[in-house]
Amino acid sequence: MSALLDVENLRVRFRSLGMLRALATGVDDPFIDAVCDVSFQVREGETLGLVGESGSGKSTIARTIMGLTPAHDGSSIRFGGDELVGLPQRSFTAHRRHMTMMFQDPVGSLSPRLTVRSLVTEPFKIHGITGRDLDKEAKRLLEMVGLTEDFARRFPHQLSGGQARRVGVARALALDPKLIIADEPTAGLDVSVQGEVLNLLARLQDELGIAILIITHNLNVVRHITDRMAIMYLGRFVEQGPTEDIFHNPRHPYTEALLSANPEPDPDARKNRVEIKGEVPSLMNRPQGCEFHNRCNYAQDLCRRKAPGVSDAGDGHVYTCHFPLDGG
Ligand code: ATP
Ligand code: SF4
Ligand code: MG
């Protein structure tokens, strides 16, 4: 499988304090790096999962790939071989036809005044595609996500959370995308509805060969649906690789702790819970050396002095830690 999306050294900066407040508080750098030196690929037809605590930068990566947030100088985002960083908006819109995003809030991300028919066919208008029978297109798209054509007349407030998600998927499918970015597609849904939405995404991927970048807090979702996964901490990737390999052999202590907090359905496979001590540091005040050192149970002097580089555990499994778990 070739790389459909190739992200290299992605950095995203936000101004986190107003200039006056920065002067008043004596902070000379009022910017935060919400995403730092992140590199990954999504291959055609594969599913990559992005996990990490709240505020670790997952949605920022998604929004930057979609061109909704600018990437910092030196970042590269190639889609289908074409560089997207620095593209003028008009050229970007042409690429956006082939990638689409399902936003974090299922109902809130659908315009309340538009009917489902308008919502699912709006991408044709946005991309200036004329001459289609929009009623037929709406019916086709709704069928693909298991909704009857009667839904076309409804408004978002008349949909359940699961139905709103399905409409979001239908809209995402309108332009035959090669990549869907799904930000927390199961958040706020009942467990049974979560399963339906995931099965829908998996089925569409199977049938249509679409690649999926899925962002979620839910590690069971990651295990169920992804081929590979990446773990974020303070805007950086600390580990990425084949999902099963990471679940069986996490190398980074943060990954170990995250996985151990996840309830395993199989009692024999349950691991001892590894507590993460302390609080997530502020992005305004990143720790020196390894940025996880103040919370890590394995930290040594070197960790406080020197940031670890990227190490390779084979088969595309990489991590950043001076003293990794043994992978046994
Ligand atoms: P969650 O799991 O809660 O959705 P996340 O991993 O998606 O979290 P992001 O929304 O990407 O996290 O935010 C990463 C960091 O960037 C946070 O500290 C957030 O406050 C900050 N941030 C995001 N957008 C902006 C913005 N427009 N301006 C300033 N800071 C921002
Ligand atoms: Fe822990 Fe050190 Fe590894 Fe950082 S480099 S995760 S502090 S062992
Ligand atoms: Mg988010």
Image: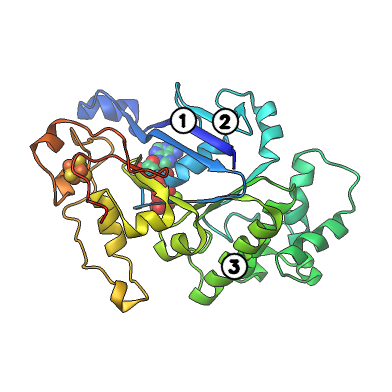
* Lower position in the chain sequence, tag 1 or tag 3: 1
Between residue 69 and residue 20, name the one nearer to us: 69
Look at the numbered discs 2 and 1 and tell me whether their residues touch, using CB distance below 8 Å: yes
Give, as a three-letter code, the residue at label 1: Glu
Label total for image? 3
Give the camera-side residue of 13 and 249: 249
Residue beneath label 2, please?
A: 78
| Lower position in the chain sequence, tag 2 or tag 3 | 2
Element at label 2: strand
Front residue of this view, candidates 322 and 219: 322
Query: Who's the residue at 27% across and 28% down the image?
Result: 22
Q: Where does the N terminus fall, quadrant-wise?
A: top right
Q: What is the x, y in percent for residue 271?
A: 25, 68
Mark 1 surroundings within 10 Å by alpha-carbon count, few (fewer than 14), some (14 through 19), many (20 or more): some
Q: Where does the C terminus fall, quadrant-wise? A: bottom left
Instruction: Name which residue lies at 57% across and 30% down.
Output: 78
Hey, what amino acid is under mark 2? Arg
Residue named by callout 1:
8
Q: Is residue 61 left or right of residue 68?
A: left
Label 2 Cα neighbours within 10 Å, binned few <14 / some 14-19 / many ≥20: some
User: In the image, residue 250 lies at what x, y percent?
Assistant: 30, 53
Distance from disc 2 to disc 3, alpha carbons, whole Å, reads 29 Å
Secondary structure at numbered mark 3: helix
Determine which residue is flagged by label 3: 199
Please report whichever mark, 2 or 1, sits nearer to the chain's N-terminal start: 1
Relative to 11, does residue 241 appear above or below in the rendering?
A: below
Image position, residue 188 (x, y; %): 48, 67
Crowdedness near tag 3: few (<14), some (14–19) or many (≥20) residues, C-alpha within 10 Å: some
Numbered disc 1: secondary structure? strand
Image side of residue 36 versus residue 117, left or right: left
Q: Is mark 3 within 8 Å of ligand 3?
A: no
